[in-house]
Image (tube, rainbow, N blue to C red):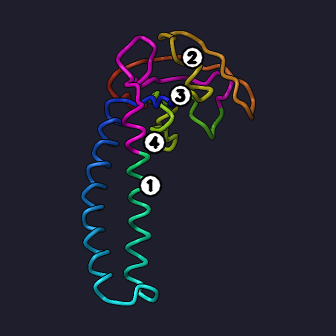
Amino acid sequence: MSQKYTLTKEGLQQYKDELAQLEIERQKNIVAIQEARAQGDLSENADYQTARDQQSKIASRIQELETILKNYVLIGEEANNLGKWVKVKFIGLEDDDYDPIQVYKIVGTLEADPLKQLISNESPLGQAIVNHKVGDKVYVKPENGDEFWAEILQISSKEIKLA
């Protein structure tokens, strides 16, 4: 059985757009290879080697994207918080150097980017938040690190601002 990739609507569109762009780049790359071949001796032709390397990278990424797009599960607007923005308060972590209130969007693993406040539904915090509602206190047990509690303050389909 193939692995299923959990994606938001936005993530799905990004992958489709990237695939379309790579198809265009692949056509340009084919022309670059043909032009480099026309220069003669391929063994010492840097343009040819560069174009072949680029062709390999493009083909690999296209194959990866096609696999994702054939095996994705779209995150809906269910009550389980997937694809939603969640404002949480970390309980017991209050200090002057760290704001205990944070906002995250719960996304699939492929879209996760903690620096952009996008956390995976498979992360310890993501798993704790899924299937809970505003006012719930959830227990988070990271693989490495201290366990903690977080309170869900707000859930929204639209981005939540901290202020």
Q: Are marks 1 and 2 in contact (CB under 8 Å)?
A: no
Q: Are marks 1 and 3 in contact (CB under 8 Å)?
A: no
Question: Height in image: 138 above or below 141?
Answer: above
Crowd around label 4: few <14 · some 14–19 · many ≥20 (10 Å): few
Magenta residues span: 65-94
Q: Marks 1 and 3, how far apart in space?
A: 41 Å
- The label shown at residue 151 is 2
> Circle 4 sits on which residue?
116
Q: Pick whichever of labels 2 and 4 is earlier in the sequence.
A: 4
> Circle 1 sits on which residue?
60
Q: Amino acid at mark 4?
A: Lys
Q: Are marks 4 and 3 in contact (CB under 8 Å)?
A: no
SS state under label 3: strand
Q: Marks 1 and 2, how far apart in space?
A: 42 Å
Q: Amino acid at mark 2?
A: Glu
Query: Image point 72% across, 31% down: which residue?
Result: 143
Q: Pick whichever of labels 1 and 4 is earlier in the sequence.
A: 1
Q: Is residue 163 or residue 80 the one in the foreground?
A: 80
Q: Amino acid at mark 1?
A: Ser
Q: Quadrant of residue 30?
A: bottom left
Q: Marks 2 and 3, how far apart in space?
A: 9 Å
